[in-house]
Image (cartoon, grey):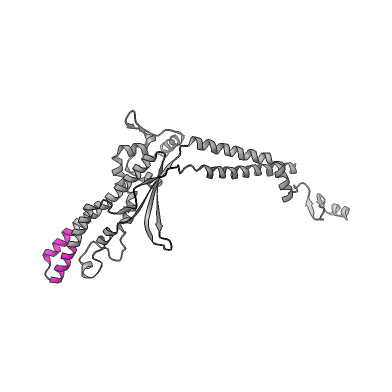
Amino acid sequence: MSNKFREEWPGVSQTQSGSPLVSGEPDISLTRLLRDLLASWYIIIAGVFFIVLLVSGYMWLVKPKYTAEIRVFPNSEIQEQLQFGAGGLTASLNPFRSSGVEEATVLERYIAAITSIGVAEKLMTMPEIVHTVFASQWDAAGQQWHPPGGLVASLKSVLRRAYGLPGWESPDARDLSGYIDRNVLVTAFTVKGSTKNIGYMLSYSSKDPVFAKRFLSQLHNEANLLVLQQERSRALERAAYLQERLEQARTKQVVETLSELLIENERKLMMMSIDDNFAAMPLEPVQVSKQPTSPKPLNLLFLAVVLGSVIGVGIVVIRNVLSAGS
């Protein structure tokens, strides 16, 4: 039987179970793989040690970052003042309410203002913030801006020239707005058991915990101020419009309605003058973490052990496959 099989299938041999096995192919099984891994334990340990060494060097070189956070909620008193004139004759006399379109809340406009050019322009007037954010482009000794150094910056400069794009320019409000968009994390949070957002948390990380707190505090103040200025402008326009309509009114009902709107509008202007946190009410002042939040040593070491083990196992498997096939 064995001789007949060899004659009919040259180049093919039989295993002990009787199934054909093409000669030249490595015989790999789970049992053999485990045996090889145990026999080559030192390779796996070496892989883990090498990756852990690299990660340890990274953590030693990288300066830790601290995270500043602030939680903000809608200013309920202001929100109520903004929602007058909801329907009926009052709504028809109020041209500042959009029909069929849901208007963004004051808090939502505050969140949008965080990354706005208007807020960035205000922050650009504060040297202690701008010079820290764009530290790689600021010469403190010469008190002037300069192109950033380093390999990445050089490659960008070469590519810009190659494609005919504008060269380097000193940072402006657009650059700061982009920086805020990339580095300030805005997270909505809800009450347990509900899907409705009740507020937002703003967080920002920096190597300097004092700067992180100052930057986030100033960002919050400027965003609040921008929304406040917009609402004050709208309220003044509304007051002028209502006053003009009141002078033209001929019926008692219209006069009473316009007078009510003027009173509510005046109350709103008064709230703007006494409430610093017009758009967003902070739960508490900006808080900074006591311990560094990045990098996280335990997480990195765990990933290093896993990655080193995978690399070590891969080396053992590839080595054994190559030796078995030769």
Instruction: Give how far across and how far down residue 322 sits, in percent.
Output: 71, 42
In terms of image quadrants, where is residue 145? top left
Q: For the C terminus, give its image quadrant.
A: top right
Answer with left or right where residue 11 lies relative to residue 251.
right
Above/below status of 148 relative to 239: above
Was residue 26 drawn as part of the magenta stretch in this picture? no
In terms of image quadrants, where is residue 96? bottom left
Q: Is residue 29 visible?
A: no
Q: Is residue 276 visible?
A: yes
Was residue 256 drawn as part of the magenta stretch in this picture? yes
Region in magenta? 238-261
Answer with left or right where residue 123 lies relative to residue 165.
left
Which residue is painted at 30% across and 42% down in the image? 123
Instruction: Give how far across and how far down residue 63 sits, in percent.
Output: 46, 37
Above/below status of 97 relative to 148: below
Above/below status of 23 relative to 140: below
Query: Which residue is the extreme one toward the top?
Result: 141
In terms of image quadrants, where is residue 168? top left
Which residue is painted at 56% across and 44% down in the image? 302
Which residue is painted at 31% across and 53% down in the image? 280
Answer with left or right where residue 247 lies relative to residue 61.
left
Above/below status of 222 relative to 140: below
Q: For the N terminus, give its image quadrant.
A: bottom right
